[in-house]
Image (cartoon, grey):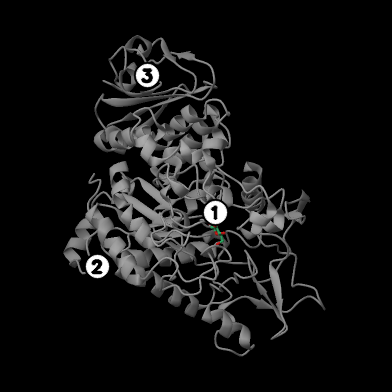
Amino acid sequence: MWNRAKSIFSIIALGLCLAAGAPCAQQAPPQASKAQHTLQKAEDPWWKHAVIYEIYPRSFQDSNGDGVGDINGITSRLDYLRDLGIDAIWISPMYPSPLVDFGYDVSDYTAIDPLYGTLADFDRLVSEAKKRDIRVIMDFVPNHTSDQHPWFKESRSSRTNPKRDWYIWRDGKGPGEPPNNWQSWFGHSAWKFDPTTNQYYYHHFYTEQPDLNWRNPQVRKAMYDAMRFWLDRGVAGFRIDAVSRLFEDPNLHDDPILPGKNAYGDPNIAHKYTDNLPEVHEVLREMRRVADEYPGNPVLISEADEPNITELTKMYGRKNDEVQLPMDFQIADVNKLSAPDFRRLLNEIERNAAGGQPHYFFSNHDQPRQWDRYGDDVHNDQIAKLMAALLLTMRATPLMYYGEEIGMRTTDPVRKEDVQDPIGKIGWPEEKGRDGERTPMQWDGSKNAGFSTAERPWLPVPPSSAEYNVNAESQDPGSILSFYKRLIALRRSESALRDGRYVPLDRDDPFVFAYLRKKPGKGDAILVVLNMSGEPRTVKFDLAADGIRDSSARPLIAAPEMAQEATVLNHFTIPAFGVFIGSVH
Ligand code: GLC
């Protein structure tokens, strides 16, 4: 399964290599005065201290029994999110859509699909969330629209239509021959012939997702106005979808062919001429200016699978004037428990030239869940806690994916006819699609795990829900959910964990990843020790140079529990896949 995700994300990486404080201050309403606005800008922004939680709306909570999650369902679960300690939710697209890519094919950027509810439901969600100190982040899909968007319908109607240039139209090379060899991320040619005007249009993703032409100023204006529409309704920012794909080489150079074939049977190619073109940064600066028109420090989060720290750093902008939180796919793509890999990548991002805030995650709606990706099939629950501790103790803004806190696992379809995600149909059996990581949230042990009263939810509820669900785990202090709650609470209460410097320890240990989170100027620190191996390990810490005088650490959270004698700093024994978080002075 993970190979599938790798096949999606790594080819582009290769292409790029070839090319070269106040934890919960509420967002002020839009009408806040200029003076207030300036004041808020000067403050430590909320997103630096937030725990962000991704909700896939189809799968979180169904309130009307149609088998698909919806906005009122999310609103009904806000108390759960507050009790978990979540500061902001990013909700995958809920715009009107023919749902070819389950919402990432937008047919109206300023409305809500009736499947999910109404704009009034959305407004109520934002206001109820605000009462609980939870911000709402929208998903924004700028690279492409649905082919059912009125803009595209106009564009395809004639070569002289005023919206013709809103999309990328080109002549073929010859009869039946597309303009060049560019491939869709989801398989086969990225060009689709349209007989109405005898030209091809470009689609980086599905054929039903034509790419917008971001070199057209009218497109930019329309999209920035769409951002303002949601900011005016009080959203706290945007997760910007597939942002590195906004531009393509105007000269249509062929992409370099690489050895081998992908899951769709196409030759592997490096997306050299369709990904990460420099103009992307101009657009990001413009988007940032739109966000900065609003008070309350709205955040921009970029989805771009950057292949290295240099490219990732560019996302912050030369003057920190692009996105505040570029998602770090390098960390997410470490597909094994590897202390050296995590240590190396963390050190790199810590030194990013922009001084930007790291943004880490391990699971999302496009990649297999972490429970089974890092698990060894024997200690998966313990490993789930280990990954939780890593995510929530690093110096970064952590991003969780619904259900990771209860140990939800990837549950792929077993028959092709059950597959919902089109890439799973195109690429079956090698590519099973992304249904496995999008199954319904597991709330309790009742029918459909409390997700829906429908006979058949849109995706089946995994069998593991009988044991792994919110209700059962809330009553078990040793559960994965209880562990997440304790970690998030500790992150809030310990300023060293929230704001402290990251000081790597144990630089060469192949199994144990250990670090300090240290308050500025003081000796106080939090010691984090993570054993990424299946054997107990004994390590030695000499923290005198870091201003620490203690000879042993005082446990705050440990899994499994550890005796005080084990935490002697010069003979520290950590169990298999163990987590230790303690304070030292
Ligand atoms: C992003 C989304 C993914 C979607 C694609 C095309 O990668 O996360 O789910 O299929 O963009 O919009």
Residue 207 visible? The answer is yes
Residue carrying label 2: 30
Q: Nearer the viewer, residue 450 or 346?
A: 450
Q: Is residue 513 above or below residue 441?
A: above
Left or right, 470 with reference to 187: left
Residue 482 spot, x, y in % from top left: 35, 33
Mark found first going from the N terminus, 2 or 3: 2
Q: Nearer the viewer, residue 293 or 460?
A: 460
- Dot 3 amino acid type: Glu
Left or right, 343 with reference to 131: right
Mark found first going from the N terminus, 1 or 2: 2
User: Dividing the picture into quarters, in which one does residue 539 lie?
Assistant: top left
Mark 1–mark 2 Cα distance, whole angstroms, equals: 39 Å
**Which label sits on residue 561?**
3
* Quadrant including the C terminus: top left
Secondary structure beneath dot 3 equals loop
- Dot 2 amino acid type: Pro
Secondary structure beneath dot 2 equals loop
Residue ID at (25%, 30%): 521
Residue 177 spot, x, y in % from top left: 80, 73
Secondary structure beneath dot 1 equals loop
Residue ID at (53%, 59%): 242
Left or right, 363 with reference to 293: right
Mark found first going from the N terminus, 3 or 1: 1
- Dot 1 amino acid type: Leu
User: Dividing the picture into quarters, in which one does residue 502 lie?
Assistant: top left
Comparing labels 2 and 3, the label whose residue is closer to the camera: 3
Residue 193 spot, x, y in % from top left: 72, 76
Residue carrying label 1: 459
